[in-house]
Image: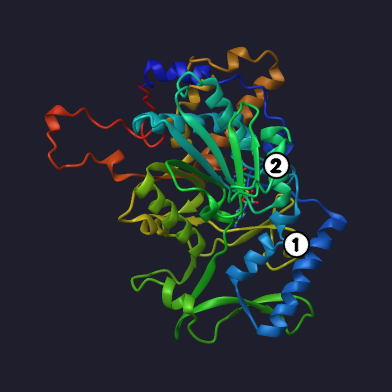
Amino acid sequence: MPPPQACCALLAAAPRLAGRRRLLSSLLAPLATRLRSCKGGEEEAAGSGGVLRHLLLKLRATGPVTVAEYMREALTNPGQGYYTRRGGVGEDFITSPEISQIFGELIGIWYISEWMAMGKQNAFQLVELGPGTGTLTDDILRVFNQLASVLSKCDVSIHLVEVSPKLSAIQAEMLTGGKVQSNPENKSAYMKGISKTGIPIYWYRDIQDVPQGYSFYLAHEFLDALPIHKFQRTEKGWHEVLVDIDPEVPDQLRFVLSPSRTPATENFIQPEETRDHVEVCPEAGVLIQRLACRIEKDGGAALIADYGHDGTKTDTFRGFRNHKLHDVLKAPGTADLTADVDFSYLRKMAEGRTATLGPIRQREFLKNMGIELRLQVQQCLQVLLQNSRDSATHEQLLHSFDMLMNPKKMGDCFHFFALLPHHRVVRPTKNDNPQSKSPLPPVAGFGELSLK
Ligand code: SAH
């Protein structure tokens, strides 16, 4: 069933696709779950040397560290971490918003749809965690601008949580043209600017610095970058996997098992666990609890998109470099380290405070959001393709659509998951007369998009 007319009009109102600037030829190559490339040569050696040297000193002084600690150092060490040190994320790896601007536009529509369904409050904060190059926020802001008449009475502000100084500078350039103020006096933010469309933008290092209030949260390919603990079941019970120096090879790292239970084994392994190898990301758990508390108290919603599973997978910790799998213990700081998100764990962390929806596959979510309305793929509903003048753009649109939607590419391995106030999905029963109430509108993406 096609979405209603109002929604078609809104989708059509979104700006035309000009072709993503940084669409790489690598997009056309077969895809691992994440497309990554890496700068080579001296820079790699410098990054690797820095983090590795630091870790070797630490390991010699205090013994093995948890995988979580290792991952934190490799990715976000303040001087040498992969995210901290590297600029130009668009060159190093590709994510859905970098592939097609339609992705971000549909997410922008999701937020407007939820804002409308929840009563069109007169102000909201859009909070993005780990914004990368800022492309996703840029696409969302363009939709907000296109639909300015819908949002005309709403005071919107953008709040970005980013630890990387390099990436925050790239985001500032992308979103404000570089016109930003560092350390604004009266704010917990470390940077502030105004978007090209006139919306205030603030930068923070931690979600806890973001002001409380009615907010919509977004985390796209963010949780997979947070540090995980790894556990192995043995004949003597659960042991934590640790990282240590390999005594056989100088300056090389290896995995070892903790000789006895660690605090993490006590806290994170569920008694009913049936797998033999388990990964837990407590930082993701704490983050979800924080978001759930905020949504319960102030309203709003959170949309989380990432690759992951529902508590079924075991060993998913991996590194990516040059579009290839990379040994996670080699040259820390020069490769992306990542692990699948366990959505069942996130659901547990939100329990009692908010309702959760998903995980739903990316291709289903985007289809529900009306992606096919924007591309002439199966239907004759042309929104974009009829406007594309040349065949190269036409080809590129089809390729980016295929990348996002093809089950063998990003369509099946990426999932969407949402936190919403209970009243958004279940009507309160107290003094409730079902006959006098209209049904709750479905949550877009998880059901058909319907905007009233
Ligand atoms: N959301 C973007 C980028 C994903 S890469 C996209 O989909 O294209 C992960 C992002 O999270 C980067 O911006 C990285 O710098 C940021 N990041 C990683 N760990 C972080 C942490 N602990 N706190 C805040 N930001 C972090």
Compared across the picture, whether 187 is left or right of 356 comes to: right
Q: In which quarter of the image is the C terminus?
A: top left
Q: Depth check: 423 or 221 in front? A: 423
The residue that appears at 63% across and 64% down in the rendered structure is: 72
Q: Depth check: 85 or 153 in front? A: 153
In this view, the mark in front (1 or 2): 2
Label 1: which secondary element:
loop
Compared across the picture, whether 305 is left or right of 298 comes to: right
Compared across the picture, whether 341 is left or right of 86 comes to: left
- Residue flagged by tag 1: what amino acid is it? Gly
Q: Quadrant of the N terminus?
A: top left
Compared across the picture, whether 436 is left or right of 55 comes to: left
Question: Could you tell me residue 218's position as x and y percent?
Answer: 51, 43
The residue pinned by badge 2 equals 181
Sequence-wise, the earlier of marks 1 and 2 is 1
Question: Could you tell me residue 314's position as x and y percent?
Answer: 49, 64
Disc 1 CB within 8 Å of nearest ligand 1 atom: no
Question: Could you tell me residue 130's position as x and y percent?
Answer: 60, 48
- Residue flagged by tag 2: what amino acid is it? Gln
Q: Which mark is residue 7?
A: none
**Tag 1 near tag 2, CB within 8 Å:** no
The residue that appears at 16% across and 42% down in the rendered structure is: 429
- Tell me: residue 138, above or below residue 351: above
Q: Is residue 206 visible?
A: yes
- Tell me: residue 245, above or below residue 420: below
Question: Could you tell me residue 281's position as x and y percent?
Answer: 50, 63
The residue pinned by badge 1 equals 79
- Tell me: residue 290, above or below residue 73: above
Gap between marks 1 and 2 measured at Cα: 23 Å
Q: Can residue 377 be seen in this view?
A: no
Label 2: which secondary element:
strand
